Amino acid sequence: MSENHSNPFENSELTTILVVSNMAKSKAFYVDVLGADIFREYGGDSLVLKFLGDWILLVTPGGPTADKPNTHFVSPINRDSVSHSFTIRVQDCNKSYEILKGRGAEFITPPVVNGAETRCFFRDPDGHLFEISEYRAT
């Protein structure tokens, strides 16, 4: 295989970085409400989580660095304007909704049925959007 066709991501994993305004609130949400596992904390402003087989890195706001000049990390400014969201496919949307609601997740609406799919949305403390979705094959 030529150099241009080799896999640049061999043996790699994807991490999603979320900028949060309050690390303590976010840590409580991701660990206590969602059930994420803490992999590592460092500097009081970064938290690495393992969640559903993926990595989430929570960081506090920060400015440019040598490797990313002119780039600012900011938490969501408007909770109703979304540029990124997570979808979690679940077996039973209503059951997952009740469990997460009982743990303190604040949902936008209860589960809504749309054909073969039932879904609903909630946010983390900074407004990052999560969807739980159940699909029933017809």
Image: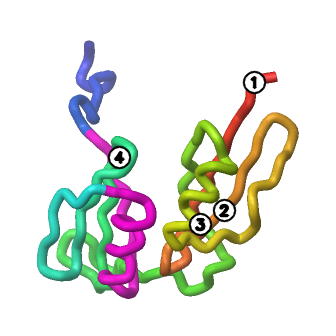
Q: Split into 4 quadrants, where in the image is the N terminus?
A: top left
Across and down, in percent, residue 20 comes to: 39, 79
Pick whichever of labels 1 and 3 is earlier in the sequence.
3
The residue at which mark 1 appears reads as 137
Mark 2 Cα shell of 10 Å, populated few (<14), some (14-19), many (≥20): many
The residue at which mark 2 appears reads as 121
- State the residue at coordinates (55%, 58%): 99
* Mark carried by residue 107: none
Say which of 9 and 50 sits in front: 50
Magenta highlight on residue 26? yes
Dot in front, 2 or 4: 2
Say which of 102 and 80 sits in front: 102
What's the amino acid at mark 1?
A: Ala
Dot in front, 1 or 4: 1
> How far apart are the two marked residues, 1 and 2, measured between alpha carbons?
21 Å
Pick whichever of labels 2 and 3 is earlier in the sequence.
3
Magenta highlight on residue 131? no
The span shown in magenta is 13-36
Q: Secondary structure at mark 1?
A: loop
> How far apart are the two marked residues, 2 and 4, measured between alpha carbons?
20 Å
The residue at which mark 4 appears reads as 54
* Mark carried by residue 101: 3
The count of marks equals: 4
